[in-house]
Amino acid sequence: MHIIITDARGARTRALHLSGARLGLLCLGLALGLLLASAALYHWVFQKGAREGWPGVGALVRLASRDELEQRDRFLRDNLDAMARRLGDLQARLLQIEALGERVSGLAGMDPAELRARPGQGGALVDGPPLSLEALQATLAALERNAGRDADLMAVAESRLFDQKMKSLMVPTRTPLDGGVPGSPFGWRIDPFTGRMALHTGVDFQAEPGTPILAAAGGVVVALGWHPEYGNRVEVDHGNGLVTRYAHALRLAVHLGDLVRRGQQLATVGSTGRSTGPHLHFELLVQGVPQDPQKFLEAGRTPPPAPLALAAQRSRGQR
């Protein structure tokens, strides 16, 4: 496209050559300029009309503002309803955790009423006014406080259960021989060497020579080696004044001061010391006084009560 520009007297002329691309850019620039000018004028007119109360303009502004506010309120209500449903799910899960915590607290020796501090809720559904943001925030804050308290109680229960588990592993309730045949029990008997009545301070287990002798519970080896009456023996301290003794062994498999775990091999069955044949002489001492080991071994063979039954029993006992 060629555009020729001349002055009034035709003394000077100027020719402009516009290609298709330049013409398109020029048209686009003009359109954008008009659009921005129109937007600025629209904004100025509506602002000035709203401030000065021009007839018709103020009504249009209020109508547009009301539509915008209604859309915003509808969006907030939809989101609040979704959050309320999520909050209900969280509350239901928290109730399940509380029920589990009540059973666990009974096993840990805690008062199950500590987890029932909040009263139960229920009833028929009657819809009320829409949930506000403040009410939702208050409910979430209460839920956070309750969850934190329950987490602390569960941590205490876990600690107590772990302590009970460790104590149970330190109590000699495991049979020291796998497959051993019980022999002489604890108590008074006729001594096989003297023929007179004598106190048998342990229980005997008949077994083939070389049969592994196992620790009845975890502990520390405090005595080891030869004894004139017990022969090769191992003594394990389990804490709280509990000591087990394994006598007449053929070979020893631990060293003095070793930390042994429940069921670990200590020695092998033999007939050393004051013995008439291969067997294990197993003793249990409390504060240095011999006790009947069979009572502890029977306690280890008795299955513990079911968690639900134990929790219910504790609950009944606290009423």
Image: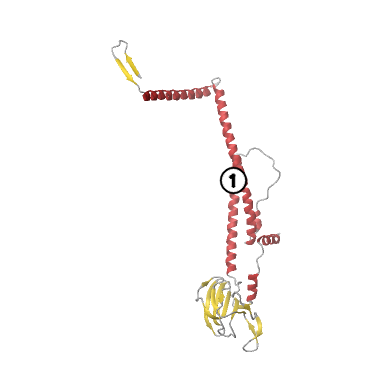
Taking the view exactly as shown, the residue that stands out farthest to the bottom is 194
Residue at x 63%, y 56% (from the top left corner) = 100
**In the depicted view, which residue is nearer to us: 39 or 164?**
39
**In the depicted view, which residue is nearer to us: 266 or 79?**
266
Q: Position of residue 288 (x, y in %)?
A: 59, 78
Dot 1: what SS? helix
Residue at x 49%, y 23% (from the top left corner) = 42
In the picture shown, does residue 49 fall above or below 203? Answer: above
Judge the density around disc 1: few (<14), some (14-19), many (≥20) Cα neighbours within 10 Å: some
Taking the view exactly as shown, the residue that stands out farthest to the left is 11
| Residue picked out by circle 1 | 140
How many numbered marks have been drawn onto this rendered protein structure?
1
Q: Position of residue 160 (x, y in %)?
A: 59, 62
Is 310 displayed left or right of 83 in the figure? right
The picture quadrant where one finds residue 22 is top left
The quadrant of the picture occupied by the N terminus is top left
Is 142 displayed left or right of 31 in the figure? right
Is 9 displayed left or right of 93 in the figure? left
Residue at x 59%, y 53% (from the top left corner) = 149
The quadrant of the picture occupied by the C terminus is bottom right
Which three-letter amino acid code belongs to the residue tagged 1? Leu
In the picture shown, does residue 3 fall above or below 242? Answer: above
Q: Position of residue 83 (x, y in %)?
A: 59, 42
The picture quadrant where one finds residue 11 is top left
The picture quadrant where one finds residue 135 is top right
| Colour option used | secondary structure
In the picture shown, does residue 32 fall above or below 180? Answer: above
Q: Position of residue 38 (x, y in %)?
A: 46, 23
In the picture shown, does residue 315 fall above or below 55? Answer: below
